[in-house]
Image (tube, rainbow, N blue to C red):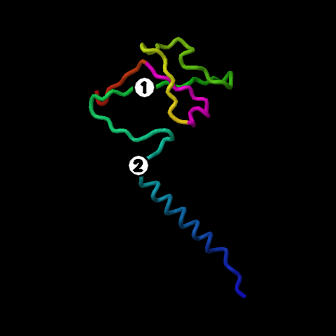
Amino acid sequence: MEVPSRRKPVMYCVCLFFVVNFFLEISDAFYLPGSYMHTYSTGDHIYAKVNSLTSIETELPYSYYSLPYCKPLGGIKKSAENLGELLRGDQIDNSPYLFSMNV
């Protein structure tokens, strides 16, 4: 009776690791959870958002606008885009800052 070798599964795992590592090193793409691909043309407007502020003094985050920063003219609007932001306690709001692509 032949005893199954434990080397085969280990060799498969090692080979798989090197193949995956090779493809990860040659790729230029990345994925940021909650983001999506968007193409901008020259002059397109890019609206900046602000997040909550953290402190080393307390565990709770501060609202960005609890400090005397410039507020948007149309008022502050919450803009959480996914469930992960809500679960992490992120307070994403609009901002008065506007950028233009390639300008």
Q: Name the disc covering residue 36, or none.
A: none
User: In which quadrant of the rendered image does the C terminus lie?
Assistant: top left
What is the spatial separation of the Cα atoms under label 1 and label 2, in whole angstroms?
25 Å
Name the residue beneath numbered marker 1: 48
Looking at the picture, how far across and down is residue 51, in whole percent?
53, 26
- Residue drawn at (64%, 74%) of the image: 7
- Confirm whether the magenta stretch covers residue 72: no
- Confirm whether the magenta stretch covers residue 87: yes
Amino acid residing under circle 1: Ala
Q: Nearer the viewer, residue 45 or 18?
A: 45
- Residue drawn at (68%, 21%) of the image: 57
Q: Nearer the viewer, residue 39 or 74?
A: 74
Classify mark 2: helix, strand or loop: loop
Name the residue beneath numbered marker 2: 28
Bounds of the magenta span?
A: 83-95
- Residue drawn at (62%, 71%) of the image: 9
